[in-house]
Image (cartoon, rainbow, N blue to C red):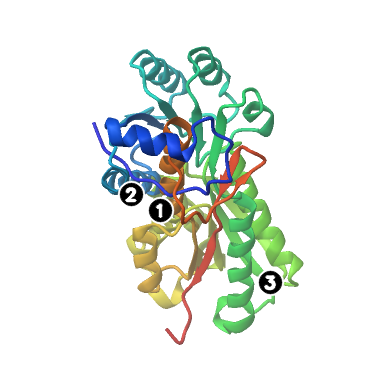
């Protein structure tokens, strides 16, 4: 069992039946409680583990601030949608007030939605976005995350700047950026969009690119190391740029280069996405040249504050987020780069 943390939403974001005066009166007479169930596609995912750690920390702050009791239980679906469906069923049977779901398969949320609707328990999907049509199936479904294409654009912009400002990036001096892609997951929307927008942004900014190869590494550092080793065996020093869909896989590329005994000066440019703690350390050390910060803290906070607002009518006055179309909480990405003057 874990306790969690959240980010406040503005009073005007949702039309709730409970008024602030009513909530205040309730708080004076009894301690309100909130029971939140969370299921993640893989608890060992670097980004998710750090997001949930922050979620847990923030719950204590919300509990102290609002004088409420918050209980959070987190389940690991271990990559199985069937397992995740069963976990949600268990949470509904145990009378959780809100269910937060990091979908294993973004195209298969219907079972979860139907079960939750039957029990009239709101569902907050997060980080792995389901298709809009599914989110419209019921009026108590929400999504917390970011727009994947923005991270791809920012990653591409970083690649453009490096190619234009650092002559050593074009190692064979042919005026073309030869690249490989470490892709997160086959047929996964975020992976596809991140790759597509990264590459198109580079080309649209006038930098010629040539794709040498790609590999599916399932967001995993270990798998990315293996895949990068294979790419190095095939393309060697012809690789000038590694576009990774997340930091974990970018670090896997770093591990492969180190294991191969390649001097740092001969490394290709490596770019990640997410801004995990390990990714930021690698950026500071110059092992990767850029990442795109995915606001895991803000998303964790938004998710819990939305849960509080939906169930208890508690709304923080210092709101900074907007609920788009009555369904979406989206936080912006931030481009982070390693520069020579640093």
Q: Earlier in the sequence, mark 3 or mark 2?
A: 2
Rendering quarter of residue 188 = top right
Q: Earlier in the sequence, mark 2 or mark 1?
A: 2
Which residue is situated farthest in the left direction here? 1
Label 3, label 2: how many angstroms apart (C-alpha)?
A: 42 Å
Residue 81 in view here: yes
Q: Quadrant of the C terminus?
A: bottom left
Number of residues whose C-alpha sits closer than 10 Å to that of mark 1, classed few (under 14), some (14–19) or many (20 or more): some
- Asked whether disc 2 touches disc 1, contact meaning CB atoms under 8 Å apart, the reply is yes
Instruction: Point out residue 14 in the picture as x, y percentages from the top left corner.
Output: 57, 39
Q: Earlier in the sequence, mark 1 or mark 3?
A: 3
The secondary element bearing badge 1 is classed as helix
Foreground: 251 or 325?
Answer: 325
**Count of numbered badges drawn on the protein:** 3
Number of residues whose C-alpha sits closer than 10 Å to that of mark 3, classed few (under 14), some (14–19) or many (20 or more): some
Number of residues whose C-alpha sits closer than 10 Å to that of mark 2, classed few (under 14), some (14–19) or many (20 or more): many
Q: Which residue is mark 3?
A: 176
Which residue is pictured at 64% across the width and 69% down the height? 177
Q: Which residue is mark 1?
A: 297
In the image, is 74 to the left or to the right of 89? Answer: left
Depth-wise, is mark 3 or mark 2 nearer the camera? 2
Task: Tell me if residue 263 comes above or below residue 165 in the rendering.
Answer: above
Depth-wise, is mark 1 or mark 3 nearer the camera? 1
Q: Which residue is mark 2?
A: 54
Instruction: Point out residue 199 in the picture as x, y percentages from the top left corner.
Output: 67, 59
Which residue is pictured at 68% across the width and 71% down the height? 176
Rendering quarter of residue 44 = top left
In the image, is 62 to the left or to the right of 331? Answer: left
In the image, is 118 to the left or to the right of 64? Answer: right
Instruction: Point out residue 334 in the picture as x, y percentages from the top left corner.
Output: 53, 64
Rendering quarter of residue 39 = top left
């Amino acid at each position: 069992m874990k306790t969690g943390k959240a980010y406040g939403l503005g009073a005007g974001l949702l039309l709730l039946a409970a008024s602030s005066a009513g909530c205040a009166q309730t708080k004076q007479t009894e301690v309100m409680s909130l029971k939140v169930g969370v299921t993640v596609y893989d608890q060992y995912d670097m980004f998710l583990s750090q997001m949930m750690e922050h979620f847990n920390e923030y719950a204590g702050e919300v509990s102290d601030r609002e004088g409420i009791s918050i209980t959070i239980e987190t389940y690991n679906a271990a990559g199985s949608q069937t397992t995740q469906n069963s976990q949600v069923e268990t949470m509904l049977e145990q009378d959780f007030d809100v269910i937060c779901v990091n979908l294993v398969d973004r195209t298969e949320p219907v079972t979860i939605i139907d079960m939750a609707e039957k029990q009239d328990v709101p569902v907050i999907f997060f980080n792995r976005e389901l298709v809009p049509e599914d989110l419209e199936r019921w009026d108590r479904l929400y999504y917390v995350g970011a727009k994947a294409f923005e991270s791809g654009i920012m990653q591409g912009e970083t690649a453009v700047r490096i190619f234009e400002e650092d002559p050593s990036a074009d190692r064979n001096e042919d005026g073309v950026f030869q690249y490989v892609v470490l892709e997160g997951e086959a047929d996964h929307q975020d992976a596809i969009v991140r790759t597509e927008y990264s590459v198109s942004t580079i080309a649209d900014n006038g930098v010629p690119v040539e794709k040498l190869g790609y590999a599916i590494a399932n967001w995993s550092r270990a798998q990315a190391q293996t895949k990068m080793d294979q790419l190095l065996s095939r393309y060697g020093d012809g690789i000038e740029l590694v576009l990774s869909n997340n930091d974990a896989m970018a670090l896997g590329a770093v591990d492969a280069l180190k294991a191969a005994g390649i001097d740092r000066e001969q490394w290709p440019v490596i770019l990640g996405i997410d801004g995990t703690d390990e990714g930021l350390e690698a950026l500071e050390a110059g092992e990767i040249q850029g990442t795109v910060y995915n606001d895991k803290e803000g998303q964790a906070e938004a998710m819990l504050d939305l849960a509080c607002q939906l169930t208890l009518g508690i709304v923080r006055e210092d709101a900074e987020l907007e609920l788009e179309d009555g369904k979406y909480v989206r936080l912006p990405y931030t481009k982070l780069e390693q520069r020579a003057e640093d």
